[in-house]
Amino acid sequence: MLLNKFSQFLLVGWLSNTLAETVVHDDHFTPDHVLRVAVAPVISGCEMRDNVVVNGTSPGPAIHLLPGARTWIRVYNDIPDQNLTMHWHGLSQRFAPFSDGTLAASQWPIPPGHFFDYEIATELGDAGSYFYHSHVGLQALSCTGPLIVEDCGSSPYAYDDERILLFQDYFQQKNQDMVEGLTSVPYTWMGETRGIFLNGKGVALGMAATEGPGGEANGFFGSRRYSGSGAVNGSPDSWDGVLGDDQIQPSAECTLPVIDVEPGKTYRFRFIGATGLSLLSMGFEDHPILVVIQVDGGEYNSAVPVDRIQLGGGQRFDVILQTKTVEELGDKATYFLQFETRDRPETYRGYGVLRYNVNSPVPPAPVVPVLALPARVNDWLEYTLQPLDPSNDPCPTPEEVTRRVTLLAEEKQDPITGRLAWHLAHMTWTDESRDKPVLVDIYERGQPAIPDYEAAVANFGWDPANRLFAARKDEVLEIVIQNTGSQFSGAAGIVETHPFHAHGARYYDIGGGPGLYDADANNAKLAALNYKPIKRDTTMMYRYGDGRVAPGAPAGWRAWRMRMSHPGVWMVHCHVLGHMIMGMESLWVVGDAEDIITIPLPASENYFTYGGSVYGSEVRAPAVYHYFDCCTNKCVDARASNCTN
């Protein structure tokens, strides 16, 4: 319904005060960043594909934000026949209402030929690595880019420089063909990944990388820092068709991706999992010590040394890497980064190059793997990551939990329609489940649009009248995602691995394990380990054993504790894009209408219709509600002196 709507068209409390006014974004208004999304033929994986690109490339530019400040990001939809939204993955719902970028939840999509101005407010504690991506169909496979919230002052971990490593899946098929296969009867799976890209560069199956020349590498370097008056050069990051310093440089050469470093330095590597399917395991040749300092942004964790990184779709890991000295290098100038997919029927192995001399040629992939990465993934960093400051907003105790909601994950076929779907808590949800975004419905109808809490408690957590999960403001939930064996005859008993992501607020990950969740046993384990969980937004529900159980049988779990402190409409879903299209999503409403409705009439009416006055175009300036005070900057007060609305 919402996906086809274009054809019909031809966080209170962040600040003590808000502007509370509607402003026309005409020529006097300049956004801080501009993203233009289009479809273009590009060379991907050494072959040609029509990709959804951002400012001309995939991934798009790295956006750097200040913590504790308001930012406007303008997103243009230059795709002539598709809708678009943009989600700011991991930044919770600390935005103006209607800015979370979720199609069926928070906003109408951006129609073709239009743009939408997203108002984002960060907190001082948001410093970390994030990314942005479309939340429509399979666009996020290529419509994505890094989003970095800088530290307010120095990081608790010292380093000389940083690099961004963003990973993507590559499919040769057209997005729409894959969507049709996933939603058709009979069903056709989208297939396995044809390649893994690092910063937009990689080698597809059946292709071979050649030796590349020396010179500047293709990738993000992370050395671009936000100044107090805007971008590094003091001007907004508006795009004029020329690639900026924070954007990858497209290349037709079939060579491996490169990460350039200098000897004897300490680097912060920001690993970003923008994959739409793959769980990755990776490590650096002859660099066995990586120190994990932050996961999923937000809060720093106590340093944890590891020899490899595992990265699921939606996850981010920030690590410290100490490069070799000139003496240790000798005559060697390049080392391989080896990455492999896990928990899929077929394994893809790819490589990047860690290069110490920019003039050194880029080697082709090795004939023999340089690392023996373990096949087992389900015990990596489990019950290990703990906050650097355990006194800061600690995890709720078992006694504080008000109720438990179990999201039973099932793959099964509808006996009437024959359609194969994923279910959570006996319900399937897709972007086509409603003909109007839930947040818009709440603004229009008020409390009658809110799910009935008691009805939801009696029905697996969701109200059968509107299929929305209900939560009271400030209650503490324990959310358990319970995996099961497939009930589809074509994959009977097969167990899938799922990265689960929550919008709205970060949660405390209290662990995972095989079989059926046992709260008493897990609480005892947490106590015995004296484990203090860290806040996350995307964690893995693994498969265990040989990946097969009886159809419908328990097959592993992941558990969270969550303070429902952010009223609004937000999602919990698997971040495998194909599973989302097949219904592995849930929509949650936190609070009552009076908690959620924070933009008064008539200003909020601009958001009520598809293509309404809040959406701009070449012939119309949008009328946008300014929710946050632009002159409040919690980190750099100097910027406020030059701030205009």
Image (cartoon, helix red, strand yellow):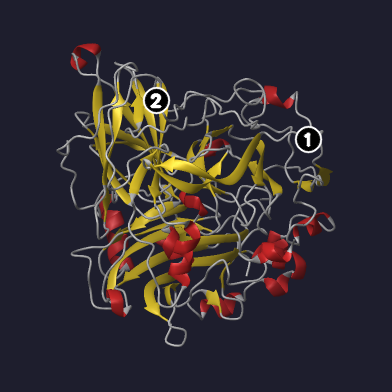
Residue at image coords 54%, 28%: 152
Query: Please, which residue is most extreme toward the bottom here?
Result: 416
Q: Can residue 547 be seen in this view?
A: yes
Between the C-alphas of marks 2 and 1, the distance is 36 Å
- Residue 265 vs 473, above or below: the answer is above
Residue 41: where, in percent of width, then height?
50, 44
- Residue 549 vs 322, above or below: the answer is below
Residue 631: where, in percent of width, then height?
74, 32
Asked whether, in this view, residue 71 is left or right of residue 616, the answer is left
Q: How crowded is mark 2: few (under 14 residues within 10 Å), some or many (20 or more)?
A: many
Q: Can residue 404 be seen in this view?
A: no
- Which numbered disc, 2 or 1, marks the residue closer to the eye? 2
Q: Toward the viewer: 528 or 423? A: 423
Asked whether, in this view, residue 39 is left or right of residue 213, the answer is right
Label 1 belongs to which residue?
A: 29
Label 2 belongs to which residue?
A: 217
Element under disc 2: loop
Q: Which of marks 2 and 1 is nearer the N terminus?
A: 1
The amino acid on which the numbered mark 2 sits, given as a three-letter code, is Ala
